[in-house]
Image (spheres, rainbow, N blue to C red):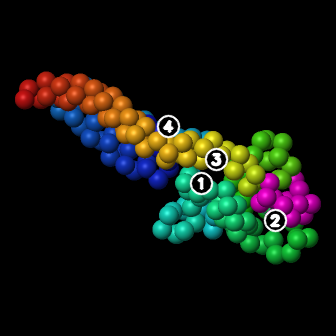
């Protein structure tokens, strides 16, 4: 099951329920396992948990003119006060973004340059903002297309509903059979 780290307690609850049912009746439910991505947790632009309510999130619905200023105002290594102070990328949320969005040579370069103050935070943020924009641009384009054709959204939702119903009906039939109801 694709989840972020925050959802692991919910998954544990689901696992408990599945195991309980399987042991009470017969094995119907597979043991739910988490599929965490390499970056199961992405912090917000202020270094706290990313959350809409904190106003520190980069939303998929944000446009380029929204995303760039958000990245520009991201917090960095708090100990790096002046441009010539060496930084520590390990405590910097901007560097975390590099690890997600930038190619390996850039990640390594930033890591070295930050530690010897060979790169400034403004340039570092610009580098990562370019990568974020590059990654999100296809989603923005797809979103724009769908917004112009709302009926396509209905079709996608209907297709999903049909496929989910097919699977859930089959599972519920097995559940009723196992419970003899
Ligand atoms: S140079 Fe980059 S990684 Fe280093 S503190 Fe500044 S923003 Fe963070």
Asked if disc 2 is less than 8 Å from ligand 1, the answer is no
Distance in Å between CA atoms under marks 4 and 3: 23 Å
Q: Do the residues labelled 4 and 3 touch (CB within 8 Å)?
A: no
In the image, taking residue 150 as reference, residue 61 lies left or right, namely right
Give the image location of residue 165, x and y in percent.
Answer: 27, 31
Q: Mark 4 points at which residue?
A: 35
Asked if disc 1 is less than 8 Å from ligand 1, the answer is no
- Which of disc 2 and disc 3 is earlier in sequence? 2
Identity of the residue drawn at 22% across and 28% down: 169
Give the image location of residue 147, x and y in percent.
Answer: 49, 47
- Which of disc 3 and disc 1 is earlier in sequence? 1
Q: In which quarter of the image is residue 139?
A: top right
Closer to the eye: label 3 or 2: 3
Identity of the residue drawn at 43% across and 44% down: 150
Q: Name the residue under label 1.
A: 42
Closer to the eye: label 4 or 3: 3
Whether the magenta-drawn stretch holds residue 113 is answered as: yes
Distance in Å between CA atoms under marks 2 and 4: 35 Å
Q: Residues within 10 Å of mark 1 (few under 14, many from 20)?
A: some
* Above or below, comparing residue 20 to residue 39 in the picture: above
- Which of disc 3 and disc 4 is earlier in sequence? 4
Residue, far left:
181
In the image, taking residue 119 as reference, residue 26 lies left or right, namely left
Identity of the residue drawn at 38% across and 44% down: 11
Q: Name the residue under label 2.
A: 122
Quadrant location of the N terminus in the rendered image: top left
Distance in Å between CA atoms under marks 1 and 2: 21 Å
Task: Give the extent of the magenta segment.
Answer: 112-127
Quadrant location of the C terminus in the rendered image: top left
Distance in Å between CA atoms under marks 3 and 2: 21 Å
Residue sitting nearer the eye, 171 or 80: 171
């Amino acid at each position: 099951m694709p989840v972020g780290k925050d959802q692991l307690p919910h998954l544990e609850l689901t696992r408990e329920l599945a195991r309980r049912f399987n042991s009470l009746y017969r094995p119907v439910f597979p043991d739910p396992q988490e599929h965490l991505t390499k970056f199961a947790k992405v912090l917000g632009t202020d270094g706290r948990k990313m959350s809409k309510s904190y106003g520190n999130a980069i939303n998929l619905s944000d446009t380029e003119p929204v995303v760039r200023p958000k990245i520009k105002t991201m917090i960095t290594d708090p100990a790096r006060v002046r441009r010539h102070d060496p930084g520590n990328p390990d405590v910097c949320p901007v560097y975390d973004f590099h690890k997600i969005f930038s190619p390996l040579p850039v990640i390594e370069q930033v890591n070295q340059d930050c530690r010897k103050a060979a790169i400034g935070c403004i340039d570092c943020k610009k580098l990562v903002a370019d990568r974020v924009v590059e990654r999100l641009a296809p989603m923005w384009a797809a979103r724009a297309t769908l917004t112009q054709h709302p009926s396509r959204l209905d079709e996608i939702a209907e297709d999903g509903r049909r496929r989910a119903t097919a699977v859930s009906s089959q599972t519920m039939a097995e559940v009723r059979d196992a419970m003899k109801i």
